[in-house]
Image (cartoon, rainbow, N blue to C red):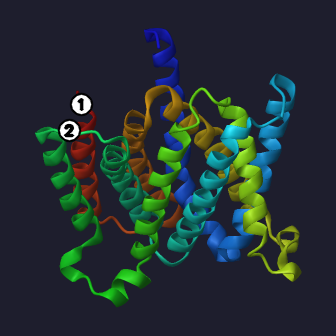
């Protein structure tokens, strides 16, 4: 990739990560209205509609046969990620979730990418991973931790969300040169909506029409900007830059997540979250700096 294209992709990734930082606040607000499966379904539906118009104008909707298993696997992990993401923000702090998940993502991606691709981690990488573990422990405040606190703080769901997203990142990288990122995003979101539908009670599917404007603003921002725009740009970057480099941009999310949650939700400032986030950024720098 030439320098100009890389600069444009980097700019798009930065904007995408800002929408992801805001998305933690959006998810927390939506969790006040209803449970995760309903929000998941409509989020995927709206994102699918956005991409339908992009795909139908630019390219055929046909899926190459060899990509179907990748889309199915990716959709399953997308549904899992969204469930853990919404459940975690529903019972925990949005800012803490934004820092914890997005700090762990690049670190865990580096570990699992090395395992699946049989890459050898350098000494620098191992030092970075050690800092990453310290960062995660600091954010979790493990010195105060027991299982009851761990569960009720939402942190268990945040960790499961991070593991699910690692699977999304690695799976998406396998679609490189097999299908365009817009078609890949459309079919992933559509299949994810169908999977989510199985978990939505029939009598509540259209209950969202009774919700107020605040709900709809947050749902649209979460679906159109964070998912349709942000996630698709991330998918695209994973195919162009590789999963490790793409995941390194996620270090922008923790601090925007904290700022948005403090401003809109009046969440408390926690020094442990800031320190852990800073250590996490340093960890990602060590892992991704060649």
Query: What x and y, as percent, mark residue 125?
Result: 19, 42
Whether residue 43 is visible: no
Quarter of the image for the C terminus: give it. Answer: top left
Closer-to-camera residue (238/265): 238
Name which residue lies at 84% across and 79% down. 204
The image quarter containing residue 82 is bottom right
Closer-to-camera residue (242/200): 242
For residue 206, the mark is none
Whether residue 279 is visible: yes
Query: What x and y, as percent, mark residue 242?
Result: 44, 32
Query: What x and y, as percent, mark residue 34?
Result: 70, 76
Q: Is residue 63 above or below residue 126?
A: above
Disc 1 residue crowd, few under 14, some 14–19, many 20+, Cα 10 Å:
few
Name which residue lies at 25% across and 82% down. 145
Number of numbered callouts drawn:
2
**Are circles 2 and 1 on residues that touch, CB within 8 Å?**
yes
Q: Is residue 193 left or right of residue 85?
A: right
The image quarter containing residue 99 is bottom left
Callout 1: helix, strand or loop?
Answer: loop
The image quarter containing residue 80 is bottom right
Q: Rounded to the nearest whole Å, what is the CA distance between mark 2 and mark 1?
A: 5 Å
Q: Is residue 97 left or right of residue 228?
A: left
Q: Is residue 55 above or below residue 228?
A: above
Q: Residue furthest bottom?
A: 148
Mark 2 sits on what residue? 286
Mark 1 sits on what residue? 289
Name which residue lies at 83% across and 45% down. 49
Callout 2: helix, strand or loop?
Answer: helix
Disc 2 residue crowd, few under 14, some 14–19, many 20+, Cα 10 Å:
some
């Amino acid at each position: 990739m030439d320098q100009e294209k890389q600069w444009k992709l980097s700019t798009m990734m930065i904007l995408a990560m800002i929408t992801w930082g805001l998305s933690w606040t959006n998810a927390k607000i939506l969790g006040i209205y209803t449970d995760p499966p309903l929000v998941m379904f409509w989020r995927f539906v709206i994102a699918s509609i956005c991409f339908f118009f992009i795909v139908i104008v630019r390219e055929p909707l046909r899926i190459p046969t060899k990509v179907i298993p990748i889309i199915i696997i990716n959709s399953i992990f997308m549904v899992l990620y969204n469930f853990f993401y919404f459940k975690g923000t529903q019972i925990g702090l949005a800012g803490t979730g934004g820092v914890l998940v997005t700090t762990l993502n690049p670190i865990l991606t580096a570990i699992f990418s090395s395992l699946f691709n049989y890459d050898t981690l350098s000494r620098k990488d191992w030092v970075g991973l050690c800092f990453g573990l310290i960062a995660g422990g600091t954010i979790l405040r493990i010195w105060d931790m027991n299982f009851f606190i761990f569960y009720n703080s939402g942190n268990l769901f945040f960790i499961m969300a991070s593991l699910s997203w690692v699977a999304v990142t690695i799976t998406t990288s396998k679609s490189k040169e097999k299908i365009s990122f817009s078609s890949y995003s459309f079919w992933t979101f559509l299949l994810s909506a169908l999977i989510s539908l199985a978990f939505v009670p029939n009598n509540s599917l259209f209950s969202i029409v009774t919700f107020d404007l605040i709900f709809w603003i947050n749902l649209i921002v979460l679906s159109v900007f964070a998912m349709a725009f942000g996630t698709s740009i991330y998918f695209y970057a994973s195919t162009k830059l590789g999963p490790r480099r793409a995941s390194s941009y996620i270090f922008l999310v923790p601090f925007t997540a904290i700022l948005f949650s403090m401003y809109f939700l009046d969440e408390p400032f926690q020094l442990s979250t800031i320190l852990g986030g800073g250590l996490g950024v340093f960890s990602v720098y060590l892992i991704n700096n060649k």
